[in-house]
Amino acid sequence: MQTPLVNDATVPAQQQTYEKVAVAEPPRKGPFDGTWWIWAMAGALFVMYAAVSLRLHQRMFTSSYDLGIFQQVVRSYAEGHLPVSEVKGQDFPVLGDHFSPILALVAPFYRVWQGAETLLVVQAALLALSVVPLALWARRALSPLAGAAIGACYGLSWGIASTVGYDFHEVAFAAPLLVLSLTALGSGRLTAAACWALPLLLVKEDLGLTVLVIGLVIAWRGDRRLGLLTAVAGLAGSALALFVVLPAFNPGGSFAYWSLVQGPATGGHGATGGGGGSLLGLLDQGTIGLVTPLPKVTTFALLLAPTLFLAMRSPLLWVALPTLVWRFASGNNLHWGTSFHYSLVLMPIVFAAFVDALVRRGTSGRSLRRYLAGSAAITLMILPSFPLFQLVQPDTWRTDSRVTVARRLLAMIPDGATVQTSDHLVPQLADRTSVGLYGSTGSRPDPQWVMVDTWVPADQRWWPGQPLGVEEEQRRLAADRRNGYDLVAFQDGYMLLHRRA
């Protein structure tokens, strides 16, 4: 029998009433109690991601490499055949370029809304969704405040911002899969960790090596059999993609990117990269090539800075090793820096390692709040240098008059036509025409229509989507007009040609 809280015989009746009310009153709820706010935060981030991506597309800042290519891939799946891309070459089989069959999941959405916007919205949804498991884990393992702070810092991190600011990419699927796998791994749910990791094999050929390391961490954390099976599946998946599937589909009969680990550093289209690069070069100079030149050190530091470098105390950080090695060993210096989408795969790993390190240290109270404040401060300090900051810049919401001109001329090209055009015009046409790059040796010859932006500056023509220099482009356009193409329009630098019947 329990001892009564109040002795009714000795305490005045009024005081008894007050004490009974105090005992029955529930604790006051804090602002981060429950989980609704996590979903609300993910929804707000989704709106931000989609707004940046869609606005860039509306302003014609998206490109053939990569939004145009991926739109052609998804359109192929939506039309019921294996993916091809005219940007890569005439009827080029994309499964010979990168192994990303998971893109077929976008096809049903593309059938509902046929346009590049579908891919950008899907990407925004995938990235926003990846915030939820991470925030839930931090909330459960540390505190509601930690869930809010870490979820927000991850959602606003520069790796995600760089992805949102540059087209669409298949690795958007890797973000939620990695977060689900690593949060399960950090929580001791090893079978779930393996199950969420295995679909990464369908995202891109190199992610099998990431699955390999996840398997090794699972084995280290206690389930040796499951971990080794996962590791073997990851290694076998990458080997099968690299040595069987990709060579079988590739017209050249081999994986197209071996040169990145064999040759000298380049700027992505033949420009000198300034030293470093190539896996074979690393064998000659030892591991020093992984940290030189300086952009590699800068990228590594910026990856860990939002975690105050505490992520280095978690074994989950080992999962980042395969991606870091191939990027820093690459002969393409675009892989070394913080631009584009290359750091997206690393952000879930770094922040999961951050949570795991805080949990393993038993961090709580004032110490935890200091770490969270430091992470938020660094995230906000870095934020203005990356594309999410465009949301508060007035120029983002202005439309250049040339965009209006370009859209009017593009509307003159009929659906189903064959077209060659400039890099940033490809995503505007890929949903309704067969479009390739003007001047590319692999493009379909003698297209029905040609539309070229002749005002692209010379210093922006190093990109694969701009295969012609200014003078060479002018000579080619003049030759086209002599050899069967009529000038339909020429306004604000946009030239539209139509082949005579």
Image (spheres, rainbow, N blue to C red):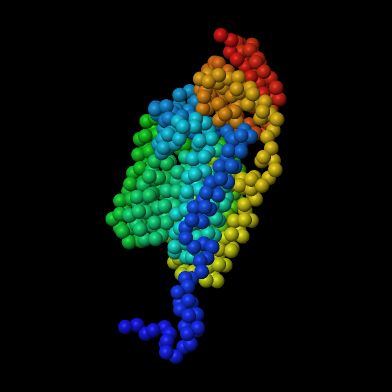
Measured as percent of width and height from the top left, residue 209 is found at 40, 47
Judge whether 428 appears above or below 171 on screen.
Answer: above
Q: Is residue 279 visible?
A: no
Residue pictured at 57% horizontal, 33% vertical: 63
Q: Nearer the viewer, residue 139 or 188?
A: 139
The quadrant of the rendering that contains the N terminus is bottom left
Spot the residue most to the bottom.
10
The quadrant of the rendering that contains the C terminus is top right
Measured as percent of width and height from the top left, residue 404 is found at 67, 28
Q: Is residue 397 visible?
A: yes
Measured as percent of width and height from the top left, residue 300 is found at 55, 53
Is residue 435 rendered to the left or right of residue 212? right
Q: Nearer the viewer, residue 126 or 199?
A: 126
Residue pictured at 35% horizontal, 39% vertical: 240
Is residue 54 rendered to the left or right of residue 106? right
Judge whether 187 appears above or below 282 on screen.
Answer: below
Residue pictured at 42% horizontal, 55% vertical: 182
